[in-house]
Amino acid sequence: MKKYFLCFLGCLAAIGMASAQSTRPVHWVHGLNGSSTTWNFHKSYFESARRIDGPASYNSTGLTNLGVVSYSNAVRSAMIPNANAIAIGHSMGGVTVRDIARYDAINSTTTFGGFIAAGAPLTGAKILNSISNGSAENFILNGVDEIVRGPATALGLYNFFVAGEPVISSVLLIKSIRKGILKFFLGSFDFPLNDTHAGSAFGVQTFDDLKENSAYMNAVNTFSGPYKDRLFIYGNESSPIHWRLASSTLKSGSGASWTSTDDEYLVNLASNFRSVYNTQNTLNITAAILAYSTFNFGVGAGHTYMASQWRKGRDWLDMSESYWAGLIGAHGTTYYAGMIDTYEDQCDMPRFEECFGNGDDPVTVDCEDCTVVPVTYAVWIPTQTGSDGLVAVYSQLAEGTPWAVSSGRTYQAVNVNHMEMRGHTHMTTELSHCFDRLDFFSTPLW
């Protein structure tokens, strides 16, 4: 009897050891026009660190442009149903795994037990609405228009040596924002942001599905449940969000880990251009004051006008992040930041053009009323509500919908933008926190 009892204990121990060493499947689902390598960094890391048996990452690039439901059906059909499995989706991939969860609830099936949505536009991506209504392209065109004004007033060799490089590069800088949206889709940042090109880039149905207040979003966000276990990871990029997002397109698609400086290239470039534009504004104001002090009103009027044109480019660079935040739905309120002293012309622009002509020597008209005077302005700084540079935090957290979860089930990827989420080490940290939970998502280390 003792021998049988010891044998029984040995069997229990063996079963326990096998259970302790068992793995769980984790499905890594890519977003719009991603590929099987999209999640490579985190997939490899966590399969080595945790008791995870990750199925092959889904390579459904050609299906993401057919709409959320079509992509969801393709991904679901490729999964082996397992109530212990976790699905992790980035961007459209996050919307997709939520759609599969809804399908399971409607059809009383179990494809997986719970999901993690990372940087997913769960209430829609407002930038797509902004593309559709023309405001996104107007943002680009207005930036180009404002950025060329200062250099356009310059003369001769000055225009070539001083203004030429900043204006060409800064226009490309502004257009890089297009590239941040269309990269890998159309292969160029010179296509206008409109329905036609966005439809070509994302697929007409997908472009429509992922908008805020689309028929798809309204249907899924009024779903009455039941709901699977779910966690949300939201990217919250630091300022300036638009230049960081555009910078990250230079590395996006790589399976390598991101570094802290990968999103800084265009940030530094924009800062340098801002310095050039501000310097030209200051130099022209100084020249105008000197000219007026010697009663050379025509020359003074010309420099004042040129200063005003350089300021337009500088001010657009200063305000561009706020404009972009509005396009993606992350624009908050404004707050008073104090007063600023500057100089301004005393007559209107037509008078400046009359006094200064078309870039030649001042014409012989009475310009004594065109002077530069000191002025003081109140400065109001716009705030942002938080975003990953492309999707506002409220959408990443499904706020205002039945899918929303308590704060204890959300994780913030600090200083991570939308393009970085697949490989940033801050995302590694937040995914580790998800796996460290003491609930369904608990996944031990090896």
Image (spheres, helix red, strand yellow):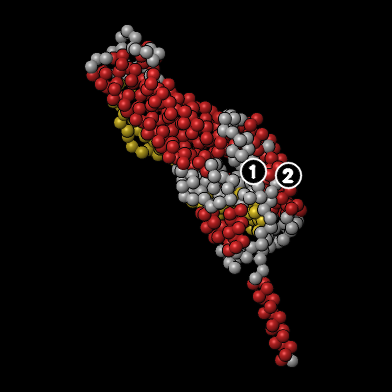
Q: Amino acid at mark 1?
A: Leu
Mark 2 = which residue? 70
Q: Nearest the camera: 244 or 378? A: 244
SS for callout 2: helix
Q: Which quarter shows the N terminus?
A: bottom right
Q: Indicate whether 307 appears above or below 17.
A: above
Q: Could you say where residue 144 lies in the image, as x and y percent from the top left?
A: 49, 27
User: Is residue 263 left or right of 196 when viewed as pictured?
Assistant: left
Image quadrant in which you'd find residue 380:
top left
- Position of residue 344 measured from the top left corner of the image (x, y, whole percent): 33, 24
> What amino acid is at disc 2?
Ser
Kindly identify which residue carries mark 1.
32
Percent x, y of residue 336:
37, 38
Residue, far bottom: 1
- Residue at (52% x, 39% y) in the render: 246
Seen at 65% across and 71% down, the residue is 21
